[in-house]
Amino acid sequence: MYLQDCHAATLAAGLLLLALFYHLVLCPWFENAFSSLTKESHSTHRRRIAAVYTKSALSKSSQLAAVTKTILLDGLVPRIAKDALGSQPTELLELSYSMCIDLVNAYLFGQSTGSKFLTQGEDLKPFLEHYENRYCAESFWPQELPRLTRFLAKIGVRLLPERATASKEWMESWMMAMCKAADVAMHDASALENIADFPTVYASLKGATDQNFSGLDPYSKQCEIASELFDHMGLVLAYTLYYVSQKPAAQRRLRKEIATVAPEMHYSSSSASFDAQGQHLPPAATLDELPYLSAIICESLRMRPNSTPLPRITPANTSVKLAGIEGIPPGVRVNAFQWFVHRDPQKWNRVDEWIPERWLDDDGRLLKGSGESQLWGFCSGPRMCAGSNLSQYLMRYILVLIFSNFAAQPVRPETFGRHPPGSLEDTLWVQLRRL
């Protein structure tokens, strides 16, 4: 269903159950905030993680600040500075996936426990291949016809290819290993030499899980936690960097705005080596106040939604009205498509163009009402993405750091748009130049 009125549809969605195929997630036999079907179950699961994802908690977290500084200054800057110094192009999708997975996992599990794709050059390809295989085309069968799929499996007919099962098991093992290591770090916190190594989100979720699910055995509790913590970003960031790279005027305007930030994030270095000791990042709240930076993020989320269609099942005992359509029967699946919501020509001018200025008034201030009433990048209401604040926190630091120190220009334009965005074949190439 094409939802013409995003806000009305979002309010109505609060009355709906999630579609059953949201269970096709990590450790699918355990519910999490994403896959829980009832309002009560969702509230229980969301409360376990909500406290560590609020904007206030993120801005005050010394662990997250330490993680962000170390990974960006010790990992990101040397990597892209090496490309720039050698006049080598940089592929943004691989860079963004590596960076975001490391950053998010470091906040979840502690830096020493989390992944090391960016900081230590771990091979990203296996992760991406297994991640992709979990959502293969044959997932249609367990998604749409789960009973038939289970019945056929009992008589030896498997509709899912072996690669999908193998990849699901690989991803689960990968997550469980980090959970186990984080558990050790949490119980031996006094021995940690670096605050960045403390598993902030894991520790909070572990305490809530022990309290709310006291009857579960230790392994089941860890599966509950692993299922809840499987979450990554990267696609929107890569395209944001590419959009800004296409617009020299946008880079100049952004650079002028971030020059007002203290301490500055321009680091003098004429080589690919970089010493992060003694360097400091500006407070997160300072970056929140930059209107053009906010406009860039809003426009990129509009152009490149970070989610698949968002299905809901109408209540079993009543019909509902959605987007002006009355009498939708009970038990019907409806979808809200962020792509269509954000590219409705009745709401947006020049819908297919990246224009961050559309979010600003004539005085350059962020327009009022530029939140969920227009932008639906993270959804809204009780099912709003719990990680939205963390995503924007990290995006702001990354954008400010890169464009404070580098100018960017797209290269290999023939590769842009050749493959589905975010697919294994998709690439975004830019040439970076040190400022």
Image: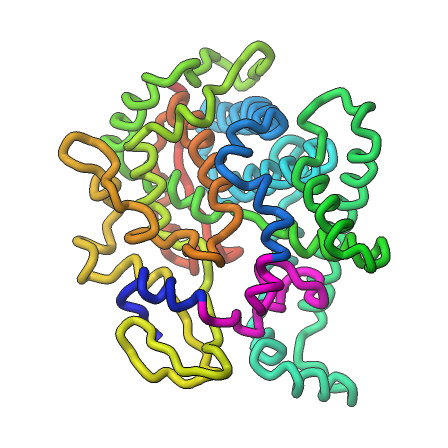
User: Whole-percent x and y of residue 324?
Assistant: 26, 74
Query: For the point 23% across and 50% down, which residue is it?
Result: 353
Q: Is residue 208 visible?
A: yes
For the C terminus, give its image quadrant: top left
Quadrant of the image occupied by residue 147: bottom right
Residue 425 vertical position relative to residue 38 in the rendered view, above or below: above
Query: For the point 26% across and 41% down, which residue is it?
Result: 356
> Is residue 24 magenta-colored?
yes
> Is residue 288 magenta-colored?
no
User: Whole-percent x and y of residue 207?
Assistant: 74, 44
Left or right, residue 357 beside residue 293? left
For the N terminus, give its image quadrant: bottom left
Between 234 and 65, the one nearer to me in the picture: 65
Q: Which residues are magenta?
A: 15-43
Between 71 and 213, the one nearer to me in the picture: 213
Q: Is residue 122 visible?
A: no
Residue 233 vertical position relative to residue 292 in the rendered view, above or below: below
Tell how many labels: 0
Quadrant of the image occupied by residue 152: bottom right
User: Whole-percent x and y of residue 392?
Assistant: 45, 39
Magenta stretch, main secondary structure class: loop
Outermost residue on the right side: it is: 217
User: Whole-percent x and y of residue 109?
Assistant: 70, 39
Left or right, residue 386 beside residue 410? right
The structure's colour scheme is rainbow
Query: For the point 47% across and 45% down, which residue is it?
Result: 388
